[in-house]
Image: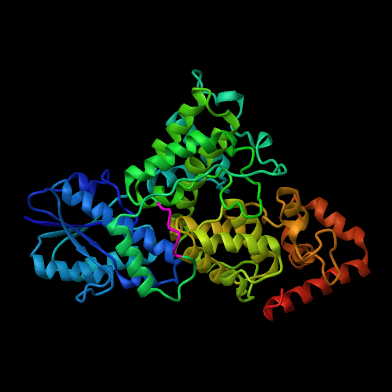
């Protein structure tokens, strides 16, 4: 009895049941580079190259370990260019008795596999993805009966469950759960990042780069230089480098932004965790070990672990709990089109230009730039959420819908009406000025709100707050903002609204 075991491009783990239980003498592992997955959004060329190179190296490692691997390359002339099509083709050619897949991370693939179950004349078994630290059932149990599903309380639950940063008495180390007050400092003058790793490109990676260059000439982004780890061994080196050289200062500068510094002290591990090369628990345990060894401060380690143990697991729970309707939510009725400068960085707003340039160059931009620059602008300007979602999904190497969609619709755009965040993450230019050195090099004046060269974030912020006053006026964390607006007087308020209209006009004309 031969089982066809399907491994997707973001499931490159030998710990999954689909690999662990395989009979190396009889079973066949199917992996396929298909056009449907490479083109359902217009992915960054580095993202496509990273995933394909990682898949090919992983397949090579399985073959060397004695597994039988059926690997379909993108340019295979018989490629059907869909995952279900390649499963059906393998079933016809191999005469297998069963198909097994690990549950996919995106709703559209969940539906595709469930539909395939009804079409095949042999069993198709969908196995759980055990790389995550909180299963669907566990998240549902935690969420049961709660009116609000706040990440902070989920995070505390997970800390206790996995005994991370807990003392001998079952209390959080340092006597508190959250050390944000010790983190998130503005950048000091001259702040630069540690040198990051770059991995040698072997023949497999070079072949992939040539393929992507030829097949995706019009996709967003710069293909080279290409620095990504494409094996678990390389990804573990990236983990060790972060723990040693970046983690000690991560907390202090996790919200800082600096011109021409795309990484600062941030981890580049999300892409490697999300494809399966490294595991969330091993990352958290290494960070904890650094704290206990005195190599990194508690505030930095706690903030980092919260991103993985808290946010990463939480957004996955939100995604599967609220899909498929979640993807279409737009409670703020935002309908503006996505400005072209999200694709080419051609804008006079230096902060946006920097964030998008980092994205074009690296298929990466750290989380505060995603949330408080590109996300914040889209929120304030009223950009249609699906367009923003598809942009984030396309341009970042770590983006898969289960993690990207809640962060975009819930955190950045408040399009879910507060399922994830109780208030919108809206801010004017003052926040950007405080947390970056971007404003020093900008065409616009962050201290001006209504003039022709006034910072667009300023007028858009107040216009946003005014437009949505009926929704947010009772929120205790926004009372001060509305009190400030009310004290401005009608003339000043009208000037803010007029400048916001002008900003949107310039945006639509490609002149902002």
Q: Nearer the viewer, residue 238 or 414?
A: 238
Q: How is the image coloured?
A: rainbow
Q: How many marks?
A: 0
Residue 102: image quadrant is: bottom left
Pick the front one: 488 or 418: 488
Q: Is residue 2 left or right of residue 151?
A: left
Which residues fall within the magenta stretch? Answer: 223-228
Main SS class of the magenta portion in the image: loop
Residue for point 57% across, 38% down: 303
Measured from the top left, where is residue 76 in percent x and y?
22, 72
Foreground: 200 or 357? 200
Residue at 65%, 50% in the rendered image: 257
Residue 502 location, quadrant: bottom right
Q: Looking at the rendering, in which quadrant would you find the N terminus? A: bottom left
Position of 318 compared to 1: left or right? right
Could you say where residue 414 lies in the image, as x and y percent from the top left? 62, 60
Residue at the extreme top of the image, as rendered: 168
In the rendered image, residue 153, in percent from the top left (x then y), is placed at 56, 39
The x, y position of residue 290, in whole percent, is: 49, 28
**Along the line of sight, the residue nearer the viewer: 485 or 32:** 32
Find the residue positioned furthest to the bottom. 509
Say whether residue 106 is magenta: no
Q: Is residue 103 visible?
A: no
Residue 241 in view: yes
Instruction: Give the answer, above or below, for where 79 lies relative to 64.
Output: below
Instruction: Tell me the quarter of the image containing the C terminus.
Output: bottom right
């Amino acid at each position: 009895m031969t089982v066809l075991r399907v491994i997707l491009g973001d499931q490159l783990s030998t710990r999954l049941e689909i690999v662990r239980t395989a009979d190396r003498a009889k079973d066949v592992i199917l992996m396929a580079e298909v056009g449907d997955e490479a083109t359902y959004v217009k992915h960054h060329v580095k993202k496509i190259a990273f995933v394909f190179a990682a898949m090919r190296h992983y397949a090579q490692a399985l073959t060397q370990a004695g597994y039988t691997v059926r690997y379909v390359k993108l340019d295979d002339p018989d490629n059907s260019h869909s995952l279900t099509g390649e499963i059906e083709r393998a079933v016809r050619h191999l005469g297998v008795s069963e198909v097994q897949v690990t549950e996919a991370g995106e709703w559209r693939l969940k539906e595709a596999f469930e539909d395939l179950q009804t079409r095949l004349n042999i069993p198709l078994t969908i196995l759980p993805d055990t790389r995550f630290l909180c299963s669907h059932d566990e998240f549902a149990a935690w969420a049961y009966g709660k009116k609000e599903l706040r990440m902070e309380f989920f995070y505390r639950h997970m800390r206790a469950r996995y005994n991370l940063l807990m003392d001998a008495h079952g209390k959080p180390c340092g006597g508190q759960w959250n050390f944000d007050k010790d983190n998130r400092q503005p950048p000091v003058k001259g702040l630069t990042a540690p040198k990051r790793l770059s991995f040698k490109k072997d023949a497999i990676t070079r072949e992939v780069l040539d393929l992507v260059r030829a097949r995706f000439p019009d996709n967003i982004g710069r293909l080279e230089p290409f620095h990504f780890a494409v094996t678990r061994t390389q990804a573990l080196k990236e983990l060790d480098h972060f723990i040693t050289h970046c983690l000690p200062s991560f907390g202090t500068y996790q919200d800082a932004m600096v011109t021409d510094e795309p990484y600062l002290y941030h981890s580049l591990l999300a892409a490697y965790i999300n494809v399966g090369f490294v595991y969330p628990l091993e990352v958290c345990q290494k960070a904890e070990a650094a704290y206990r060894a005195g190599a990194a401060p508690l505030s930095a380690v706690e903030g980092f672990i919260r991103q993985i143990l808290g946010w990463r697991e939480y957004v996955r729970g939100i995604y599967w709990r609220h899909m498929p309707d979640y993807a279409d939510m737009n409670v703020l009725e935002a309908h503006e089109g996505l400005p072209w400068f999200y694709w080419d960085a051609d804008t006079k707003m230096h902060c946006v230009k920097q964030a998008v340039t980092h994205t074009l160059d690296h298929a990466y931009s750290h989380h505060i730039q995603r949330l408080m620059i590109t996300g914040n602008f889209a929120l304030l300007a009223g950009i249609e959420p699906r367009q923003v979602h598809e942009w984030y999904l396309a341009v970042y190497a770590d983006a898969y819908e289960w993690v990207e969609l809640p962060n975009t619709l819930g955190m950045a755009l408040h399009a879910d009406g507060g399922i994830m965040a109780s208030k919108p993450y809206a801010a004017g230019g003052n926040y950007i000025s405080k947390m970056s050195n971007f404003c020093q090099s900008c065409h616009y004046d962050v201290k001006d709100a209504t003039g022709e060269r006034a910072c667009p974030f300023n007028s858009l912020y107040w216009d946003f707050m005014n437009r949505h006053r009926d929704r947010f006026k009772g929120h205790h964390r926004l009372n001060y903002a509305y009190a400030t607006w009310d004290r401005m007087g009608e003339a000043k308020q009208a000037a803010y609204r007029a400048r916001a209209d002008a900003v949107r006009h310039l945006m639509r004309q490609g002149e902002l």
